[in-house]
Amino acid sequence: MIQHLLVLPRLHIQNANAISSPMTWGFPAMSAFMGTMQALERNLPDDIRLVFNEIGVVCHHIEPQVTSGGFTRAFHLTRNPVDKTGGTAAIVEEGRAHLDISLLIGVESGGGDDLKSDERRQAIAKQLYQQVQGMRIAGGSVMPPHPGERRHRPELISFDTKEAESAKQWRRLKRRLLPGFALVLRDDRLIEHTATLKADEESATPLDAWLDLSRLNHECLVAKEEDGKEEDGKEHVKWEIRRPYPGWLVPIPVGYGAISELFDPGTVANARDPEVSFQFVESLYSIGEWVSPHRIQDPEAMMWFVENDLEHGLYRLNNAYTDTLIND
């Protein structure tokens, strides 16, 4: 259960990375926001002694930097300067998007910091909100509020030990997060849809289920018209969108899986940091769902946390949204 929640509201991010993995694009990967949380924790002032455990993201607006019009879209690309020979430099495709988001970080007092005082909590929230203004989030720059825009107040909430009071605090916070959508993990949808496809085709794989849930499927239905004169009506074809599950489902990367052994520090040439161990990995994928915060009954349901399995070489993020549904 979350005891303290740091709310950093309505951050305007310009040119965030919109290519979240080799197979997906759009909203940045949750690993990017987990990196933001870890960077913020590592650069805490000496007088703030907190431990950051988990993070949730609510997206209020996204504006991909792509061409408009038509079904096929292309990213807006920059024109790089000429190279040292005077020739045209190669264009490397980069996907960017402007975001308006709110970050929610589950924290706990790790060094005796007094979080019982309301003044102390609000001083910490204000200081960290100012600190995040100078950071980069998902590769994008945090921009100051627009002129004339209502300033949204950061807050460090200490939930009451009484369930009724903590529920009231969460309902009050949810209203501040609207309009917007929170990204949660739906591994259960992927597992269930894989079993559904296997029932029809034994060779179906989780990749087939992931692709099927990632696209918009149209199904052809043949029906007969009843004209009232003849027993056999005329056949007509109707196309309908097939949605296996309700909700706004999207493909998302959730971490990395090892494809090689773990090498000792300094044994792999051109590694970014020769002082740490090195391992070749590839992206892991799952299914996510965008959910309005007013439908979330427990703040724990929208929080993401690190859940690595070093024995099997899995470095991934997890989310407890499905567990909260079971408990409800």
Image (tube, rainbow, N blue to C red):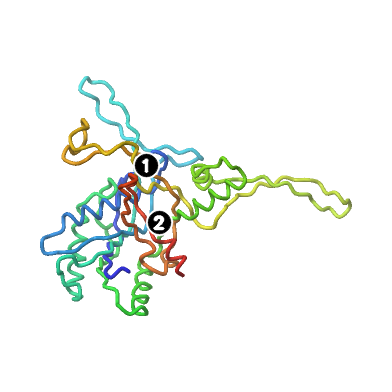
Image coords of residue 47 (percent x, y):
11, 64
Could one spot residue 253 in this view of the protein?
A: yes
Q: Marks 1 and 2: in contact by CB < 8 Å?
A: no
Looking at the image, which residue is at 51% across and 57% down?
Answer: 247
Give the number of the disc on residue 183: 2
Q: Is residue 121 left or right of residue 97?
A: left
**Tag 2's secondary structure?**
strand
Vertical arrangement, residue 104 with respect to residue 83, above or below = below
Residue placed furthest toward the front: 311
**Tag 1's secondary structure?**
strand
Looking at the image, which residue is at 58% across and 50% down?
Answer: 196
Give the number of the disc on residue 247: none
Image coords of residue 302 (percent x, y):
38, 61
Q: Nearer the viewer, mark 2 or mark 1?
A: 1
Q: Is residue 129 left or right of residue 216?
A: left
Q: Is residue 144 left or right of residue 200?
A: left
The type of residue carrying mark 1 is: Ser
Looking at the image, which residue is at 30% across and 32% down?
Answer: 79
Image coords of residue 221 (percent x, y):
69, 47
The type of residue carrying mark 2 is: Leu
Residue 279 in which image quadrant: top left
10 Å crowding of disc 1: few (<14), some (14-19), many (20+): some
Instruction: State the residue in front, 54 or 67.
Output: 54
Image coords of residue 193 (percent x, y):
54, 50
Residue 260 in which image quadrant: top left
Could one spot residue 151 in this view of the protein?
A: no
Residue 266 in which image quadrant: top left
Residue ID for mark 1 = 283
- CA gap between label 2 and label 1 equals 18 Å
